[in-house]
Image: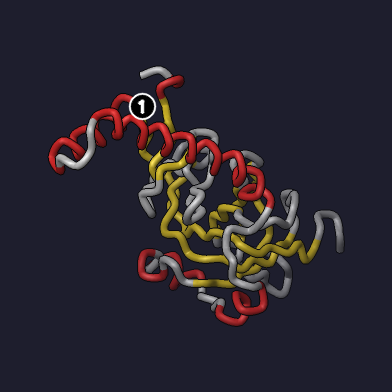
Amino acid sequence: MKDDDLLGYRCPTCKTINPKHVKYCVHCGHWLLDDTFKAEPIYRDTYLKQIRSYTTKKKRFSLKTFLLVAGILFASLVLIGSLTSHSLTTSPVTTIPFEEFKATAVDLPYDELARNTEKYKGTRVHCVGDVVQVIENPPVLRINVAKPKPDKFILNPEIVWITRKDSAGRVLENDTVEIWGTVKGPRTYRAVLGQSITVPEIESYYLVVTRKVGDK
């Protein structure tokens, strides 16, 4: 189908239909470009057929009323998208105050989180690590949360995938960051040599750069 026929995307988490230019669900904040939990494209013809089928079974609406309702719904989606697309990219999705979020976040050992990621989905967590990769769009970090030895040499990195929903601004590679967020689940990515690596994924709602690259 043509892009002109695309109405928007249905959120895989809360099933809300979002305008096509919105990257984050207007209801729950889920990242709609996520390759793991993909949003469902909603096309005009398909959407109209679904509503027509529903109204035919229920025998509650005439075709004229149905088209009017569909038109109003589409116009509402466009309006919501125009009002919220800016705020969703510049402010934290969570409405929980920082102090409350911080007080309820836990520090999980990496081995426990990596082995039982599904078990901790939705858990508020706190972690500190060095940034090893920055992806600007969509905003993503990979951080190494392994604690350095006395000689400051880390033999085995402990990588966490960070999907950014905070408003802390730009982060650079080799910055040290402190993050408060929620566990989203396991995330698989392809390394430089081509092998697949699965690590815990955390959505960051609050982020602080505790040491900038180049600082001693």
Front one among 210 and 16: 16
Q: Is residue 96 above or below residue 213?
A: below
* Element assignment for label 1: helix
Total labels drawn: 1
Residue ID at (61%, 82%): 103
- The image's colour scheme reads secondary structure
The amino acid sitting under disc 1 is: Arg
Q: Is residue 25 left or right of residue 89?
A: left
Q: Is residue 63 left or right of residue 191?
A: left
Residue to which mark 1 is pinned = 44
Front one among 88 and 135: 88
Residue ID at (36%, 38%): 40
Rendering coords of residue 86 (x, y %): 66, 44
Q: Is residue 52 visible?
A: yes
Rendering coords of residue 120 (x, y %): 41, 70
Rendering coords of residue 31 (x, y %): 50, 47
Q: Residues within 10 Å of mark 1 (few under 14, many from 20)?
A: some
Front one among 82 and 165: 82
Rendering coords of residue 198 (x, y %): 43, 52
Figure quadrant of residue 45: top left
Residue ID at (44%, 67%): 122
Front one among 174 and 82: 82
